Amino acid sequence: MISELQKCPCLFATTADNVAVMGRVSNDALSFVVIATTPDGKTGKAELNDVTLQIVKEKTNKTYSWERFFDEIQTAFNGGKVQAKDTTKVACDFTVEGEKAIFDLTPSTDDGQAMMIDALLNYQYIHSHTKEVEKQLDEAAKKETETRQQAMDLEKEEQNLNQTITRSKEQDELNQRRVAELQAELAAAEKNRSKDGQNETITEDEEEGAICRARNPLYKRECKDFDPDILRMVKGKFLKENPDVNAPFHNVIRPWTTSEFAQQTSSFSSTQKQELWRLLGDVDKWEYDVFGIQTQMSGDDHYSLPSQPKGGSLFFTMYALMMRHGLFQKFKVDEKIFLNWLSAIEAGYHGNPYHNSMHAADVLHITHFILSKGGLVKKINLTDEDVLAALFAASIHDYDHPGINNSFHIRAQTYLATLYNDRSILENRHVSSVMELMKLPKYNFLASLSEEQRRDVRETVIEMILATDMGLHGKFVSQWKRRIAENHDLTKKDDVRLALAMAIKMADISNCGRPTNLYLRWSAKIADEFYMQGDRERNFGLSCSPFMDRQQPAMAKGQVAFMNYVVVPLFESISEFLPDMHFSVDFTEQNKSYWNNNPDDVPAPAAA
């Protein structure tokens, strides 16, 4: 009915009794208005919606379609077949079988004559200014489209906010439970104090507190409740020689014998282990899927991130790559201490949409790829210490990330901004927190290295993580281009560390150069985190940072700009030095094309 009603023009007629009648669509285009006025100024009015019009139509002819009904109304007005003796009833004679459409009007205080004159003037204006009216209609249609898009954006924002509220409630429950535990611990500690206020013997926790001022994300635990069979499976894949079961790198996970390995990998005890084994087979490939690893380890790639009681993708991938590069054996790493450390590192990542332990696992894998398949190890003859430092740095590069960037800290003048003097705030936080934690012997897996080796690894790790500050991106890229233009033979320690810094920088933004199905999942997560920061900025009374205002989404524009000005120049520069990495530029161009075909004003399809 509505669509046919909206096609009906404004209609005018004068009856034999000199009653002026007008029929038109209402201002909201949802009902039909009939107005009648007499020469002495009396006015009657009726506004008929779909229900009341249906009654009129059925009394006229039940078989009429709405199109036929409104055609007959127009014919009656245009053919002088409208009847009215006063302003209480208007009848339109139809041409078939003498039916009449009867409209019952009620007295109105409106000036019917003025309303009709205005309508006639509008009618005249429309026909005499056709182009101007068409322009106004086009603008109105454009505005309607924009309004509809805004409505869709607001609905999407509401959904996102509801999801955020749900996640916040879940996190609040976890926090409340933790507060209750801490309060119970505090009460117990108070009871242990002597009546005269003197402390009793110093506890182990107090001794540790004197050594290390960093928080332990595992609280009183040392290690996660990992599945030893999963780690045994990983160890078996990369262990190529008969193991010395008494070595420190086997003091937790006993390796399988050759026959056990063959048996276990031919018939898995669970679909989880079978799927992890399949995914592990891609660890040397660009397509390695941390989403799949995370799902198998912890159930999904979001809600499990804050806790991951049995380890997630970072735990799995770091253990695998330590075995893949033979670093346990080369440095006689104590496996128990390493698992403690790895548990604490993964637990130290927050459940942010993007900067979480799964992102760390992804950056860790890509760093490994650049070193191995990308050719960096062979190109500049990296030492075992360099490889260890690179994996170490990648795994901790966003440790304790709060989900907001350096710019937010500086604008809001947070404690960390003051502590680090507005310089590489988060990057300093990431590396210093881990180094402080490793003052505790139970987390210092580098204890088996010599003093010189530990200093070398530490300095390389610091250099690599500080290089991930995007505020220093231009400086590092310029330095890198200048250095490889001078000489491709990078042998000095500073040159080696610069190359490793560029590797982790590439890994940190490698999402843009991944297969599109993986890229879209990461881009959705970074958008979610950006919008959450924008919400915080708005709550602080600050203007939203570029591309972080969920009320003005600019996902496509932001991603294309980031690829054009940051990703592609960096990838091309590294590919010049490591030709085997050039395919990443091609992937980036494919993903850029995706956004060119799905601009911000067109809703993008959900990521697979």
Image: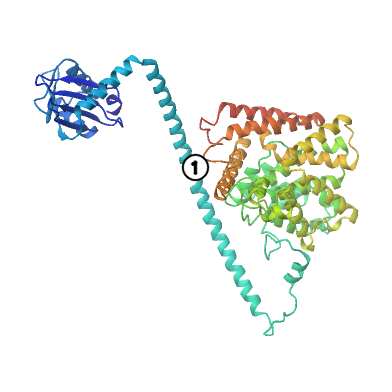
Residue 57 visible in the current orientation: no
- Residue visible at 74% across and 71% down in the picture: 206
Image quadrant holding the N terminus, namely: top left
The residue indicated by pointer 1 is: 157
Q: Which is nearer the eye, 91 or 88?
A: 88
Amino acid type, label 1: Glu
The picture places residue 252, in percent across and down from the top left corner, at 76, 59
Count of numbered badges drawn on the protein: 1
- Residue visible at 48% across and 48% down in the picture: 162
Q: Which is nearer the eye, 441 or 248?
A: 441
- Tell me the quarter of the picture where residue 52 sits: top left
Q: Which is nearer the eye, 336 or 596?
A: 596
- Tell me the quarter of the picture where residue 90 sits: top left
Mark 1 burial class by Cα count in 10 Å: few <14, some 14-19, many 20+: some
| Left/right of residue 607 with respect to residue 37 in the rendered view | right
Q: Residue furthest front?
A: 40
The picture places residue 374, in percent across and down from the top left corner, at 78, 34
- Residue visible at 45% across and 40% down in the picture: 155
Image quadrant holding the C terminus, namely: top right
The picture places residue 409, in percent across and down from the top left corner, at 66, 50
| Left/right of residue 601 with respect to residue 309 in the rendered view | left
The picture places residue 240, in percent across and down from the top left corner, at 81, 46
- Residue visible at 62% across and 56% down in the picture: 307
Visual colour scheme: rainbow
